[in-house]
Amino acid sequence: MYAKVLGSSILGIDGFLVEIEVDLANGLPQFQIVGLPDSSIRESKDRVRAAIKNSGYHFPIKRITINLAPADMKKEGSGFDLPMAIGILMASEQIDIRDSEKNLEKTLFIGELSLDGSIHGINGILPMAIEAKQKNIERLILPKQNVDEARLVHGIEVFGFSHLKDVIEFLTGNRYPSSNDENSEYNKFNSFIDYEVEDFIDVKGHVQVKRAIEVAVAGMHNLLMIGPPGSGKSMLAKRIPSVLPPLTWDEMLEVTKIYSVAGEFGERGKLMSKRPFRQPHHSISSAGLIGGGSSPKPGEISLAHRGVLFLDELPEFSRHTLESMRQPLEDGKVTISRARAAYVFPAEVMLVGAMNPCKCGYYGAEVPGHECQCTPLEVKRYRSRLSGPLLDRIDIHIEVPWVNIETLREEKEGKSSQMMRESIEKARMMQKRRFENERIQFNSEMNAKQVKQFCQLEQEAEDLLKQSFNQFGLSGRSLSRILKISRTIADLEESEKIKVAHLAEAINYRVLDRKE
């Protein structure tokens, strides 16, 4: 006695289809699952057995073998409970599904069973639904809690159920509703996950810092702000989402898919409409920051994909944690290798860091009533917590000065987020035209060949670059960063060539490269 149904699992942030084959044979009673199941799948034997019994059906006392194909890929999650239960009931001939080949070869089952037969929602439905659509699956049968999330993928019928008995009645009645049925309105529009963002117009002073943020966002450059406590570093960082461009539809699906897999999809059936802003605490582990674990999940850097990763008090993060970001910042992705599989999580982020200039926080800062108590050695030791290779990957280093009472109390309003966003959009349009035939979107993503091609300097700017390279002892990577920043500044000025003023401003954004 044999039956086959379709299920799905997750590898990284992508779904893949799994054929669930059920074989019942005579012999000593045994329940075996093969095909590289993880512990949650192996534990499903007890859940499936109890769910079948408590739904009014008989669990067969036979030698039961379930194979999860392809057998060479590790399967994870509790979403195989429902298809295994349906397969067992079909193989034991307790349910009769008319035209079973026609109905089941294009039907995907997903769901976790409780002991009483209830069906619980699971994480990662969106990437599974996307994969099902790409593999020409016509309908999904899944938990009611996941219906809205699955309906984000148009062109596939979605049916949600809350109990195993309801699924069986649906299948044995051979009653597949049309797309007009209330239970399969897969074209129903779902709203967006939204959040409030604060405006830069509230920021008093800090004209230079706001300019640096404008440059950073225009070219998606990484940014580090250095200043005394209370100077406004966190306030500035939290307003960066207000000047970021909206996500495209494909980017919305991509970001939402990551949150679905990570289990942080608080409002199922809604798309992430704004770019993420993540702010992990400095006590986070390297696995929490870049992803990992026994069953690898996306970390904070992947949850910030297409958005901002803000690391406040940057030197307080462990050195190992910070160094683990070097490869993801360079490649735009995290690769986690395991014995059975390699997991790839996207990590195209704008890194924004904030730090004090020294341990006490007042080195070089003109703050009344506060003087730096650190020795030169202590200052050097504090700053050395950030390695040279990591600083090389942060394009812009900008000092955030302390703001006096006169500036804070003035009535004059500063540059608003709307004004900054208009300049940024013009610069991004220039980049879009420039990289039309390239595989990149922003100046920060240019490789060495593209830097040489698109970062043409005027002669005066060339002379200044050579002088600065020798004076500050820049590395090759720092030189490349300066050229990319110069290109973005020129784009903000709508200039095809990089002028000496553009280069000088870019060099001023590398304060930690200067010799004391």
Image (tube, grey):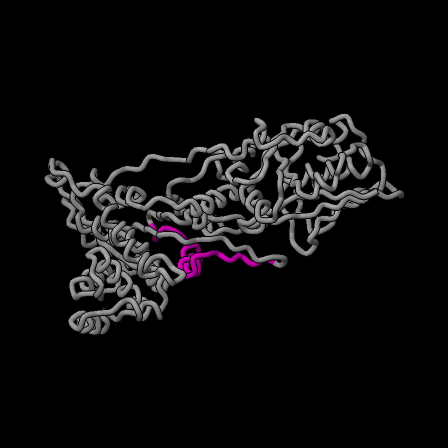
From this view, report whether residue 313 is shown above or below residue 331.
Answer: above
Question: Image check: 477 left or right of 182?
Answer: left
Q: Is residue 335 magenta?
A: yes
Quadrant in which the N terminus is drawn: top right
> Against 174, is 21 above or below?
below
Q: Residue at x 70, y 54 (%)?
A: 71
Q: Where is residue 435 drawn, in percent x and y?
A: 34, 61
The answer to which image quadrant residue 221 occupies is bottom left
Residue in the image at 78% along x and 32% along y: 95
Q: Looking at the picture, how far across and down is residue 42, in whole percent?
A: 70, 43
Whether residue 384 is visible to the viewer of this picture, yes or no, is: no
What is the magenta range? 314-338
Name the image quarter holding the C terminus.
bottom left
Q: Is residue 457 something one can see in this rendering? A: yes
Residue positioned 26% across, 64% down in the render: 482
In the orientation shown, which residue stands out farthest toward the right?
27
Tell me where residue 513 appears, x and y as whole percent.
Answer: 26, 64
Give the camera-side residue of 418 and 118: 418
Along the viewing direction, whichever of 407 and 60 lies nearer the viewer: 60
Q: Nearer the viewer, residue 361 or 164?
A: 164
Numbered label tally: 0
Residue at 32 percent across and 56 percent down: it is 432
- The image position of residue 312, as x and y in percent, is 33, 47
Residue 170 in magenta? no
